[in-house]
């Protein structure tokens, strides 16, 4: 059986050394100050290589919404989109770049105490923690999409904390949740959507990464089952299955898909025999940018996962039926 995850450490570093591994539970801050001298780099290197982001994905039978605020050191960016699952098209797709510190900020706290914001011409996004209710407040105010939502942390399953070394960089850490109850509303395309039956997941990450970074990612979450899978720059560190609120570590994830036709079905499985799924896209948000010194290719299909998962090789497989989620194919020179 997959071994239980140890509890999250109080901080990422002890005596300058990162706590590499996978853990269950909240951490107060994703903070790399105090790395041992052998892992230190110049101020300029850190400025160019320190990447931080907060991402929220939430959805129900009618829609899927993705919101991100990203600080890549020398610039910042934000996006917010709403995909209408019934019409199978994007009703809103907004993004904007800005200056870190002046127009955007991603704080060190991933959940409790979280504070991330973006303020640009025609767009304001924020994600903040309400300590009294233990909820994340998500706000999007853009021309194509308006959203006010609360994400309840009080009854969530133990979140994942993953920490690990990065080839060509130094170290990375991510805190990810499984299904969070949502309360609120969204407006796009002349329609107003209630979100009170939606489920959300949060990804808070901070790393000293390589200039060239690539990954394939899959994430889907419901009240009884959820998972996070990645194949790329972070190895197997963040591969996790949640079953009935309990987290189980997974092995290496294999993504079988046609990068030239990302709206065709994907097969995703893990080499430990604990997960085997087919992902059927309903649509996607995509973006390709090339500034010469920096470039990115990004496609995030939205769709349904079907197949099975299990906590151990001896356990009876749990069927996964039309579980809403996303995959992602991402390559960056940043």
Image (cartoon, rainbow, N blue to C red):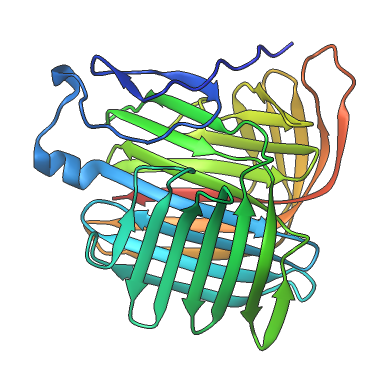
Residue shown at 40% from the left, 54% from the top: 115
Specify the farthest residue to the bottom.
190
Q: Looking at this view, is 195 or 325 the one in front?
A: 195
Q: Nearer the viewer, residue 20 or 273?
A: 20
Residue at point 18%, 46% (across, down):
47
> Would residue 12 be visible to someone looking at this image?
yes
The x and y percentages for residue 55 are 50, 53
Question: Horizontal and vertical percent for residue 213?
Answer: 37, 41
Q: Residue at x 75, y 28 (%)?
A: 275
Direction front: furthest residue: 132
Q: Position of residue 189 (x, y in %)?
A: 64, 85
Q: Is residue 251 above or below residue 328?
A: above
In this picture, residue 202 sits left or right of residue 318: left
Residue at 73% across, 59% down = 198
Q: Is residue 121 left or right of residue 177?
A: left
Q: Judge by depth and name the residue closer to the eye, 251 or 92.
A: 92
Q: Position of residue 22 (x, y in %)?
A: 52, 21
Question: Does 275 sit above or below residue 44?
Answer: above
State the image quarter where residue 193 is shown. Answer: bottom right
């Amino acid at each position: 059986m997959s071994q239980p995850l140890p509890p999250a450490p109080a901080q990422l570093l002890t005596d300058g050394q990162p706590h590499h591994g996978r853990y269950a539970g909240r951490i107060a801050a994703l903070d790399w100050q105090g790395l041992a001298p052998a892992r230190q780099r110049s101020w300029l290197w850190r400025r160019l290589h320190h990447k931080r982001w907060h991402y929220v994905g939430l959805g129900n039978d009618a829609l899927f919404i993705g919101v991100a605020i990203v600080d890549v050191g020398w610039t910042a960016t934000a996006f917010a989109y709403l995909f209408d699952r019934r019409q199978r098209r994007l009703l809103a797709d907004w993004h904007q770049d800005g200056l870190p510190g002046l127009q955007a900020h991603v704080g060190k706290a991933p959940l409790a105490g979280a504070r991330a914001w973006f303020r640009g011409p025609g767009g304001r996004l924020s994600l903040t923690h309400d300590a009294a209710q233990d909820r994340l407040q998500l706000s999007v105010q853009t021309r194509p999409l308006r959203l006010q939502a609360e994400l309840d942390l009080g009854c969530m399953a133990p979140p994942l904390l993953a920490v690990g070394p990065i080839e060509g960089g130094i170290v990375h850490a991510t805190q990810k949740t499984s299904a969070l109850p949502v309360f609120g509303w969204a407006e796009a395309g002349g329609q107003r959507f209630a979100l009170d039956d939606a489920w959300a997941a949060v990804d808070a990450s901070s790393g000293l990464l390589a200039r060239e970074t690539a990954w394939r990612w899959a994430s889907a979450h419901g009240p009884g089952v959820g998972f996070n899978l990645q194949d790329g720059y972070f190895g197997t560190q963040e591969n996790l299955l949640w079953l009935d609120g309990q987290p189980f570590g997974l092995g290496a994830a294999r993504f079988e898909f046609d990068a030239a036709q990302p709206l065709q079905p994907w097969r995703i499985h893990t080499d430990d025999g604990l997960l085997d799924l087919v992902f059927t896209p309903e649509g996607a948000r995509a973006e390709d940018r090339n500034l010469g010194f920096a470039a990115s290719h990004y496609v995030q299909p939205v769709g349904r996962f079907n197949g099975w998962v299990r906590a151990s090789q001896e356990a009876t497989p749990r069927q996964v039926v039309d579980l809403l989620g996303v995959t992602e194919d991402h390559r960056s020179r940043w």
